[in-house]
Amino acid sequence: MACSGGIDSVVLAHLCVNANLDFELAHCNFKLRGEESDKDEEFALKLGLNIGKKIYITNFETIDYSYLNKVSIQVAARELRYDWFSKIQQENAIKYLVTAHHADDNLETFIINLSRGSGIDGLKGIPHNTDVIKRPLLPFSQEQIMAYAQTNMLKWREDKSNADTKYLRNKIRHQIVPLLKELHPTFLDNFTNTQHYLEQTAAIVDNTLSKVKRSLFLSENNRYKISIEKLKELHPLKGYIYGLFKSYGFTEWQNVAGLLEAMSGKEIHSKTHRLVKNRGYLLLTTLEEVLNKEFVVKESMDAVKDPVVMDISLVESVEERSLNTLYVDKETLKYPLTIRKWKKGDYFYPFGMHGKKKLSKFFKDEKIDVLSKESQWLLCSDDQIVWVIGKRADNRFKITSETKHVLKFKVKE
Protein backbone atom coordinates (compact mmCIF):
# COMPACT_ATOMS: atom_id res chain seq x y z
CA MET A 1 0.00 0.00 0.00
CA ALA A 2 1.36 3.39 -1.00
CA CYS A 3 1.40 5.46 2.18
CA SER A 4 2.22 9.17 2.14
CA GLY A 5 0.99 9.71 5.69
CA GLY A 6 -1.81 11.95 4.47
CA ILE A 7 -5.46 11.48 5.39
CA ASP A 8 -6.33 9.33 2.37
CA SER A 9 -3.63 6.69 2.89
CA VAL A 10 -4.14 6.66 6.67
CA VAL A 11 -7.87 5.98 6.22
CA LEU A 12 -7.13 3.26 3.66
CA ALA A 13 -4.63 1.61 6.03
CA HIS A 14 -7.22 1.75 8.86
CA LEU A 15 -9.88 0.16 6.65
CA CYS A 16 -7.53 -2.62 5.51
CA VAL A 17 -6.53 -3.42 9.08
CA ASN A 18 -10.21 -3.67 10.05
CA ALA A 19 -10.81 -5.95 7.08
CA ASN A 20 -7.93 -8.23 8.21
CA LEU A 21 -6.16 -7.87 4.86
CA ASP A 22 -2.59 -9.02 4.38
CA PHE A 23 -0.62 -5.96 3.35
CA GLU A 24 2.57 -3.94 3.80
CA LEU A 25 3.24 -0.21 3.51
CA ALA A 26 5.60 1.72 1.23
CA HIS A 27 6.58 5.36 1.81
CA CYS A 28 8.59 7.64 -0.48
CA ASN A 29 10.52 10.64 0.81
CA PHE A 30 10.94 12.89 -2.22
CA LYS A 31 13.09 15.36 -0.23
CA LEU A 32 11.17 18.32 -1.61
CA ARG A 33 10.02 19.96 1.64
CA GLY A 34 13.05 19.64 3.90
CA GLU A 35 12.14 18.91 7.52
CA GLU A 36 8.47 18.43 6.62
CA SER A 37 9.35 15.54 4.30
CA ASP A 38 11.42 13.92 7.05
CA LYS A 39 8.53 14.27 9.52
CA ASP A 40 6.23 12.56 7.00
CA GLU A 41 8.70 9.68 6.88
CA GLU A 42 8.79 9.46 10.71
CA PHE A 43 4.99 9.46 10.82
CA ALA A 44 4.76 6.65 8.24
CA LEU A 45 7.25 4.56 10.24
CA LYS A 46 5.21 5.02 13.43
CA LEU A 47 2.01 4.16 11.57
CA GLY A 48 3.56 0.89 10.43
CA LEU A 49 4.58 0.08 14.02
CA ASN A 50 1.16 1.02 15.42
CA ILE A 51 -0.77 -1.23 13.04
CA GLY A 52 1.82 -4.01 13.08
CA LYS A 53 2.71 -3.85 9.39
CA LYS A 54 6.08 -3.90 7.66
CA ILE A 55 6.94 -0.64 5.93
CA TYR A 56 9.37 0.00 3.07
CA ILE A 57 11.04 3.42 3.05
CA THR A 58 13.07 5.09 0.32
CA ASN A 59 14.50 8.55 -0.39
CA PHE A 60 14.66 10.13 -3.83
CA GLU A 61 16.72 12.98 -5.28
CA THR A 62 13.60 14.14 -7.12
CA ILE A 63 14.93 17.52 -8.29
CA ASP A 64 18.05 15.92 -9.79
CA TYR A 65 15.92 13.29 -11.55
CA SER A 66 13.61 16.01 -12.89
CA TYR A 67 16.56 17.98 -14.27
CA LEU A 68 18.38 14.99 -15.80
CA ASN A 69 15.24 13.58 -17.45
CA LYS A 70 13.79 16.96 -18.45
CA VAL A 71 10.41 16.34 -16.79
CA SER A 72 8.37 18.29 -14.25
CA ILE A 73 8.72 17.63 -10.51
CA GLN A 74 5.26 16.01 -10.51
CA VAL A 75 6.15 13.66 -13.37
CA ALA A 76 9.53 12.89 -11.79
CA ALA A 77 7.90 11.96 -8.46
CA ARG A 78 5.32 9.77 -10.21
CA GLU A 79 7.92 7.91 -12.29
CA LEU A 80 10.23 7.40 -9.31
CA ARG A 81 7.57 6.06 -6.97
CA TYR A 82 5.86 3.73 -9.41
CA ASP A 83 9.19 2.27 -10.57
CA TRP A 84 10.08 1.67 -6.92
CA PHE A 85 6.68 0.16 -6.10
CA SER A 86 7.06 -2.21 -9.06
CA LYS A 87 10.53 -3.23 -7.88
CA ILE A 88 9.20 -4.03 -4.38
CA GLN A 89 6.40 -6.12 -5.88
CA GLN A 90 8.78 -8.12 -8.07
CA GLU A 91 11.33 -8.72 -5.32
CA ASN A 92 8.75 -9.77 -2.73
CA ALA A 93 6.16 -11.54 -4.90
CA ILE A 94 3.51 -8.97 -3.96
CA LYS A 95 0.50 -9.25 -6.25
CA TYR A 96 -1.11 -5.82 -5.96
CA LEU A 97 -0.23 -2.21 -5.35
CA VAL A 98 -3.06 -0.42 -3.51
CA THR A 99 -3.39 3.37 -3.64
CA ALA A 100 -5.75 5.79 -1.88
CA HIS A 101 -7.06 7.72 -4.89
CA HIS A 102 -10.65 8.87 -4.38
CA ALA A 103 -13.53 10.40 -6.36
CA ASP A 104 -12.25 13.99 -6.07
CA ASP A 105 -8.84 12.89 -7.42
CA ASN A 106 -10.70 11.35 -10.34
CA LEU A 107 -12.59 14.56 -11.05
CA GLU A 108 -9.37 16.59 -10.95
CA THR A 109 -7.72 14.16 -13.40
CA PHE A 110 -10.73 14.42 -15.70
CA ILE A 111 -10.51 18.23 -15.76
CA ILE A 112 -6.74 18.15 -16.34
CA ASN A 113 -7.15 15.79 -19.30
CA LEU A 114 -10.09 17.79 -20.64
CA SER A 115 -8.05 21.02 -20.49
CA ARG A 116 -5.21 19.41 -22.44
CA GLY A 117 -7.44 17.77 -25.04
CA SER A 118 -8.30 14.12 -24.73
CA GLY A 119 -10.25 11.25 -26.22
CA ILE A 120 -12.45 8.82 -24.32
CA ASP A 121 -9.48 7.12 -22.63
CA GLY A 122 -8.35 10.33 -20.97
CA LEU A 123 -11.88 11.28 -19.94
CA LYS A 124 -12.44 7.92 -18.26
CA GLY A 125 -10.12 9.20 -15.55
CA ILE A 126 -8.23 7.01 -13.12
CA PRO A 127 -8.92 3.28 -13.63
CA HIS A 128 -10.36 1.46 -10.61
CA ASN A 129 -8.27 -1.63 -11.24
CA THR A 130 -5.45 -2.77 -13.48
CA ASP A 131 -3.55 -6.06 -13.48
CA VAL A 132 -1.38 -4.84 -10.60
CA ILE A 133 -3.03 -1.73 -9.11
CA LYS A 134 -6.19 -1.53 -6.99
CA ARG A 135 -7.90 1.72 -5.94
CA PRO A 136 -10.68 0.80 -3.48
CA LEU A 137 -11.43 4.40 -2.39
CA LEU A 138 -12.34 5.69 -5.87
CA PRO A 139 -16.11 5.50 -5.20
CA PHE A 140 -15.77 7.76 -2.15
CA SER A 141 -15.43 11.54 -1.93
CA GLN A 142 -12.85 13.53 0.02
CA GLU A 143 -15.70 14.65 2.27
CA GLN A 144 -16.62 11.04 3.12
CA ILE A 145 -12.98 10.17 3.82
CA MET A 146 -12.64 13.16 6.14
CA ALA A 147 -15.83 12.18 7.99
CA TYR A 148 -14.50 8.65 8.49
CA ALA A 149 -11.14 9.92 9.79
CA GLN A 150 -12.80 12.27 12.26
CA THR A 151 -15.32 9.67 13.47
CA ASN A 152 -12.48 7.22 14.16
CA MET A 153 -10.20 9.93 15.60
CA LEU A 154 -7.40 9.11 13.20
CA LYS A 155 -4.22 11.17 12.96
CA TRP A 156 -2.51 12.12 9.72
CA ARG A 157 0.00 14.54 8.19
CA GLU A 158 -1.01 17.61 6.23
CA ASP A 159 1.13 18.35 3.17
CA LYS A 160 1.22 22.15 3.01
CA SER A 161 2.26 22.05 -0.66
CA ASN A 162 -1.24 20.73 -1.47
CA ALA A 163 -2.52 24.26 -0.83
CA ASP A 164 -0.07 25.87 -3.30
CA THR A 165 -2.10 26.85 -6.39
CA LYS A 166 0.99 27.26 -8.58
CA TYR A 167 0.44 23.57 -9.36
CA LEU A 168 -2.32 22.85 -11.89
CA ARG A 169 -3.97 20.07 -9.85
CA ASN A 170 -4.09 22.26 -6.74
CA LYS A 171 -5.55 25.16 -8.72
CA ILE A 172 -8.29 22.85 -9.99
CA ARG A 173 -8.83 21.38 -6.49
CA HIS A 174 -9.14 24.71 -4.67
CA GLN A 175 -10.56 27.06 -7.30
CA ILE A 176 -12.52 25.12 -9.93
CA VAL A 177 -13.97 22.05 -8.17
CA PRO A 178 -15.62 24.10 -5.35
CA LEU A 179 -17.40 26.21 -7.97
CA LEU A 180 -18.64 23.11 -9.79
CA LYS A 181 -19.97 21.64 -6.55
CA GLU A 182 -21.61 24.96 -5.73
CA LEU A 183 -23.19 24.97 -9.18
CA HIS A 184 -24.84 21.65 -8.49
CA PRO A 185 -24.89 19.96 -5.04
CA THR A 186 -24.70 16.46 -6.54
CA PHE A 187 -22.06 17.37 -9.11
CA LEU A 188 -19.58 14.72 -7.94
CA ASP A 189 -22.20 11.96 -8.02
CA ASN A 190 -23.33 13.09 -11.49
CA PHE A 191 -19.71 13.11 -12.65
CA THR A 192 -19.20 9.56 -11.33
CA ASN A 193 -22.27 8.38 -13.26
CA THR A 194 -20.97 10.08 -16.40
CA GLN A 195 -17.68 8.25 -16.06
CA HIS A 196 -19.52 4.92 -15.83
CA TYR A 197 -21.26 5.78 -19.12
CA LEU A 198 -17.93 6.74 -20.70
CA GLU A 199 -16.38 3.45 -19.57
CA GLN A 200 -19.21 1.52 -21.22
CA THR A 201 -18.91 3.57 -24.41
CA ALA A 202 -15.14 2.99 -24.41
CA ALA A 203 -15.73 -0.75 -24.08
CA ILE A 204 -17.97 -0.68 -27.18
CA VAL A 205 -15.35 1.32 -29.08
CA ASP A 206 -12.56 -1.07 -28.05
CA ASN A 207 -14.63 -4.06 -29.14
CA THR A 208 -15.28 -2.49 -32.56
CA LEU A 209 -11.62 -1.53 -33.01
CA SER A 210 -10.52 -5.06 -32.09
CA LYS A 211 -12.70 -6.52 -34.83
CA VAL A 212 -11.41 -4.01 -37.39
CA LYS A 213 -7.82 -4.65 -36.34
CA ARG A 214 -8.18 -8.42 -36.71
CA SER A 215 -9.32 -7.98 -40.31
CA LEU A 216 -6.91 -5.20 -41.23
CA PHE A 217 -3.63 -5.96 -39.42
CA LEU A 218 -2.10 -8.99 -41.12
CA SER A 219 0.65 -10.60 -39.05
CA GLU A 220 3.71 -11.36 -41.16
CA ASN A 221 7.30 -12.06 -40.05
CA ASN A 222 7.03 -10.40 -36.62
CA ARG A 223 5.28 -7.33 -38.00
CA TYR A 224 1.90 -6.15 -39.24
CA LYS A 225 1.03 -5.39 -42.86
CA ILE A 226 -1.89 -2.99 -43.28
CA SER A 227 -3.64 -2.27 -46.60
CA ILE A 228 -3.82 1.49 -47.19
CA GLU A 229 -6.79 1.05 -49.54
CA LYS A 230 -8.79 -0.78 -46.87
CA LEU A 231 -7.70 1.68 -44.19
CA LYS A 232 -9.02 4.57 -46.28
CA GLU A 233 -12.44 2.89 -46.46
CA LEU A 234 -12.92 3.45 -42.72
CA HIS A 235 -15.02 6.46 -41.66
CA PRO A 236 -14.35 8.64 -39.80
CA LEU A 237 -10.79 7.93 -40.89
CA LYS A 238 -8.95 10.02 -38.31
CA GLY A 239 -10.93 8.43 -35.47
CA TYR A 240 -10.06 4.95 -36.67
CA ILE A 241 -6.40 5.89 -37.21
CA TYR A 242 -6.13 7.17 -33.65
CA GLY A 243 -7.88 4.15 -32.21
CA LEU A 244 -5.93 1.57 -34.20
CA PHE A 245 -2.43 2.99 -33.73
CA LYS A 246 -2.49 4.66 -30.28
CA SER A 247 -1.41 1.49 -28.44
CA TYR A 248 1.80 1.54 -30.52
CA GLY A 249 2.60 5.09 -29.41
CA PHE A 250 1.24 6.89 -32.51
CA THR A 251 -1.11 9.35 -30.81
CA GLU A 252 -0.90 12.09 -33.48
CA TRP A 253 -3.33 10.79 -36.10
CA GLN A 254 -2.21 13.49 -38.59
CA ASN A 255 1.25 11.88 -38.81
CA VAL A 256 -0.20 8.49 -39.73
CA ALA A 257 -2.70 10.06 -42.15
CA GLY A 258 0.16 11.89 -43.87
CA LEU A 259 1.93 8.58 -44.37
CA LEU A 260 -1.01 7.26 -46.41
CA GLU A 261 -0.25 9.78 -49.19
CA ALA A 262 3.55 9.78 -48.82
CA MET A 263 6.10 8.25 -51.18
CA SER A 264 7.04 4.60 -50.65
CA GLY A 265 9.82 4.34 -48.10
CA LYS A 266 8.62 7.22 -45.93
CA GLU A 267 8.39 6.31 -42.26
CA ILE A 268 7.47 7.68 -38.83
CA HIS A 269 8.50 6.51 -35.37
CA SER A 270 6.92 6.41 -31.94
CA LYS A 271 9.01 5.67 -28.85
CA THR A 272 8.49 1.94 -29.34
CA HIS A 273 7.38 1.33 -32.93
CA ARG A 274 8.08 2.13 -36.54
CA LEU A 275 5.51 2.64 -39.30
CA VAL A 276 6.74 2.48 -42.90
CA LYS A 277 4.92 3.20 -46.18
CA ASN A 278 5.65 0.44 -48.68
CA ARG A 279 3.70 0.78 -51.91
CA GLY A 280 0.07 0.06 -51.03
CA TYR A 281 0.74 -0.95 -47.43
CA LEU A 282 1.82 0.32 -44.05
CA LEU A 283 4.34 -1.92 -42.29
CA LEU A 284 4.28 -1.81 -38.49
CA THR A 285 7.15 -3.21 -36.45
CA THR A 286 8.92 -2.66 -33.16
CA LEU A 287 11.59 -0.01 -33.19
CA GLU A 288 14.99 -1.66 -33.14
CA GLU A 289 18.43 -0.44 -34.06
CA VAL A 290 19.62 -1.70 -37.42
CA LEU A 291 22.31 -4.29 -36.70
CA ASN A 292 25.50 -3.54 -38.65
CA LYS A 293 27.64 -6.13 -36.90
CA GLU A 294 29.48 -8.71 -38.97
CA PHE A 295 29.50 -12.37 -37.89
CA VAL A 296 32.50 -14.55 -38.68
CA VAL A 297 32.25 -18.08 -40.10
CA LYS A 298 35.48 -20.04 -39.73
CA GLU A 299 36.49 -22.95 -41.96
CA SER A 300 36.38 -25.31 -38.98
CA MET A 301 32.76 -24.50 -38.15
CA ASP A 302 29.99 -26.99 -38.93
CA ALA A 303 27.17 -24.76 -37.72
CA VAL A 304 26.23 -21.10 -37.23
CA LYS A 305 23.89 -19.95 -34.46
CA ASP A 306 23.98 -16.19 -34.90
CA PRO A 307 22.50 -14.20 -36.63
CA VAL A 308 20.86 -17.12 -38.47
CA VAL A 309 20.82 -20.79 -37.52
CA MET A 310 22.63 -22.68 -40.25
CA ASP A 311 24.34 -26.06 -40.67
CA ILE A 312 27.49 -26.38 -42.78
CA SER A 313 28.69 -29.69 -44.20
CA LEU A 314 30.71 -31.31 -46.98
CA VAL A 315 28.55 -33.47 -49.25
CA GLU A 316 29.16 -35.69 -52.23
CA SER A 317 26.67 -33.95 -54.51
CA VAL A 318 23.56 -31.78 -54.60
CA GLU A 319 20.95 -33.49 -52.46
CA GLU A 320 18.04 -31.04 -52.53
CA ARG A 321 17.05 -27.69 -53.96
CA SER A 322 15.37 -25.01 -51.85
CA LEU A 323 15.66 -21.32 -51.07
CA ASN A 324 17.10 -22.18 -47.66
CA THR A 325 19.85 -24.44 -49.04
CA LEU A 326 23.05 -23.40 -50.81
CA TYR A 327 25.67 -25.58 -52.54
CA VAL A 328 29.00 -24.01 -53.46
CA ASP A 329 32.41 -25.02 -54.72
CA LYS A 330 34.46 -24.98 -51.51
CA GLU A 331 37.66 -24.01 -53.34
CA THR A 332 36.09 -20.73 -54.52
CA LEU A 333 35.66 -19.50 -50.93
CA LYS A 334 38.18 -17.41 -48.99
CA TYR A 335 37.96 -17.86 -45.23
CA PRO A 336 36.91 -16.57 -42.84
CA LEU A 337 33.47 -15.97 -44.32
CA THR A 338 31.23 -13.25 -42.92
CA ILE A 339 27.51 -12.78 -42.47
CA ARG A 340 26.37 -9.16 -42.64
CA LYS A 341 23.54 -6.85 -43.65
CA TRP A 342 23.49 -5.33 -47.12
CA LYS A 343 24.87 -1.86 -47.74
CA LYS A 344 24.58 0.74 -50.46
CA GLY A 345 26.60 -0.18 -53.56
CA ASP A 346 26.48 -3.95 -52.95
CA TYR A 347 26.21 -6.06 -56.08
CA PHE A 348 26.37 -9.75 -56.99
CA TYR A 349 26.10 -12.12 -59.93
CA PRO A 350 22.69 -13.76 -59.52
CA PHE A 351 22.66 -17.51 -60.13
CA GLY A 352 20.92 -18.32 -63.40
CA MET A 353 21.53 -14.87 -64.87
CA HIS A 354 24.29 -13.23 -66.94
CA GLY A 355 26.27 -10.34 -65.54
CA LYS A 356 26.14 -8.53 -62.23
CA LYS A 357 23.24 -6.77 -60.56
CA LYS A 358 23.03 -4.19 -57.81
CA LEU A 359 21.44 -5.64 -54.73
CA SER A 360 19.08 -2.66 -54.48
CA LYS A 361 17.81 -3.43 -58.00
CA PHE A 362 17.44 -7.12 -57.11
CA PHE A 363 15.32 -6.18 -54.07
CA LYS A 364 13.17 -3.90 -56.19
CA ASP A 365 12.64 -6.52 -58.90
CA GLU A 366 11.75 -9.11 -56.26
CA LYS A 367 9.32 -6.61 -54.67
CA ILE A 368 11.07 -6.91 -51.31
CA ASP A 369 9.83 -4.22 -48.92
CA VAL A 370 11.89 -1.77 -46.87
CA LEU A 371 11.81 -3.71 -43.61
CA SER A 372 12.64 -7.01 -45.28
CA LYS A 373 15.62 -5.40 -46.99
CA GLU A 374 16.91 -4.17 -43.65
CA SER A 375 16.57 -7.61 -42.08
CA GLN A 376 18.23 -9.42 -45.01
CA TRP A 377 21.50 -11.22 -44.24
CA LEU A 378 24.29 -11.89 -46.75
CA LEU A 379 26.88 -14.65 -46.69
CA CYS A 380 30.13 -13.17 -47.99
CA SER A 381 33.63 -14.33 -48.96
CA ASP A 382 36.31 -11.63 -49.03
CA ASP A 383 33.39 -9.17 -49.08
CA GLN A 384 31.99 -10.76 -52.24
CA ILE A 385 28.39 -11.88 -51.86
CA VAL A 386 28.14 -15.66 -51.94
CA TRP A 387 24.47 -15.87 -51.00
CA VAL A 388 21.58 -13.49 -50.41
CA ILE A 389 20.49 -15.88 -47.69
CA GLY A 390 17.21 -17.57 -48.41
CA LYS A 391 16.78 -15.79 -51.75
CA ARG A 392 19.51 -16.13 -54.40
CA ALA A 393 23.03 -17.59 -54.74
CA ASP A 394 25.92 -15.95 -56.60
CA ASN A 395 27.10 -17.45 -59.90
CA ARG A 396 30.80 -17.07 -59.04
CA PHE A 397 30.66 -19.80 -56.38
CA LYS A 398 28.51 -22.34 -58.20
CA ILE A 399 29.33 -26.02 -58.59
CA THR A 400 30.88 -26.95 -61.93
CA SER A 401 32.31 -30.09 -63.56
CA GLU A 402 35.67 -29.08 -62.04
CA THR A 403 34.36 -28.94 -58.48
CA LYS A 404 36.17 -31.31 -56.10
CA HIS A 405 34.47 -30.43 -52.81
CA VAL A 406 30.81 -29.46 -52.47
CA LEU A 407 29.96 -27.39 -49.42
CA LYS A 408 26.35 -27.26 -48.25
CA PHE A 409 24.81 -24.44 -46.21
CA LYS A 410 21.38 -25.22 -44.77
CA VAL A 411 19.34 -22.59 -42.94
CA LYS A 412 17.04 -24.03 -40.30
CA GLU A 413 13.52 -22.59 -40.45
Image (tube, rainbow, N blue to C red):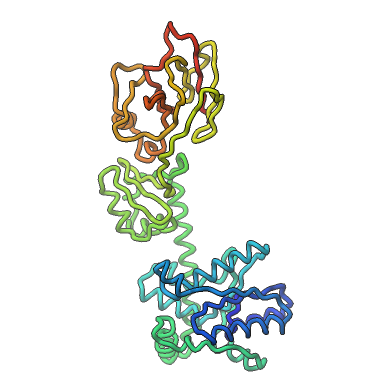
- Residue 196 visible, this orientation: no
Q: Nearer the viewer, residue 83 or 23?
A: 83
Would residue 272 be found to the left or right of residue 81 on screen?
Answer: left
Residue 368: give x, y in percent of width and height.
35, 34
In the rendered image, the vertical position of residue 153 relative to residue 109, given as above or below: below
Image quarter of residue 144: bottom right
* Residue at point 37%, 36% (across, down): 373
In the rendered image, the vertical position of residue 88 relative to residue 248, given as above or below: below
Residue 235: give x, y in percent of width and height.
33, 56
Residue 301: give x, y in percent of width and height.
55, 25
Which quadrant of the rendered structure holds the N terminus? bottom right
Image quarter of residue 4: bottom right
* Residue at point 51%, 27% (across, down): 411
Q: How many marks?
A: 0
In the rendered image, the vertical position of residue 393 relative to residue 33, given as above or below: above
In the rendered image, the vertical position of residue 72 relative to residue 175, given as above or below: above
